[in-house]
Image (cartoon, rainbow, N blue to C red):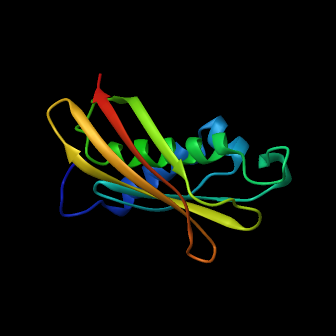
Amino acid sequence: MNDAAGLTPDQKGRIADALHGLPFAQLIGMRLVDVRPGEATIKIEMRDDLRQPHGVLHGGVTATLIDTAMAFAIITRLDEGEKATTVDLTVHYLRPHFEGTFTCTAKVVRAGKRIITVSADVINGEGKQIATAISTYTKV
């Protein structure tokens, strides 16, 4: 599935089914927007149960969205039967989010033999960046 030329509609469908079939992704309302080789975009619509006590988006939801988008970006670069897991994740929260959709786009920065580096940006419905992140994954 790591063909740089692109993903087939069947591959994209299987990836969407995989995300939408994850109980935790369903719980917080993740929806796949787009997937291409080395890149995945996932969105969530803000709801009251995703807020922290001050009424803004909970940072854990943002981090979960980032980690999930990164994992799906990586999936597109793995060979059949390969798996990867998060080693570290650094998130910088740039502005609070109160209402509407927020979207994360994750991109593979470098895929080595064993270590994969990924970056991600989360934007709100106005196109303003609410978080940015970098992560390292390892093949297992």
Position of residue 129 measured from the top left corner of the image (x, y, whole percent): 54, 66
Q: Residue at x 79, y 49 (%)?
A: 51
Position of residue 9 measured from the top left corner of the image (x, y, whole percent): 37, 63
Left-right relation of 105 to 137: right
Count up the numbered dots: 0
In depth, the one of 71 and 51 nearer the eye is 51
Position of residue 104 measured from the top left corner of the image (x, y, whole percent): 51, 58
Q: Residue at x 14, y 33 (%)?
A: 113
Displayed quadrant of residue 127: bottom right
Position of residue 140 measured from the top left corner of the image (x, y, whole percent): 29, 22
In depth, the one of 45 and 8 nearer the eye is 45
Q: Residue at x 21, y 49 (%)?
A: 2
Q: Residue at x 72, y 41 (%)?
A: 27
Rendered view: 128 above or below 83:
below
Left-right relation of 8 to 22: left
Instruction: Name the outermost residue toward the left.
Output: 113
Rendered view: 112 above or below 122:
above
Displayed quadrant of residue 89: top left
In depth, the one of 50 and 33 nearer the eye is 50
Instruction: Name the outermost residue toward the top.
Output: 140
In depth, the one of 52 and 112 nearer the eye is 52
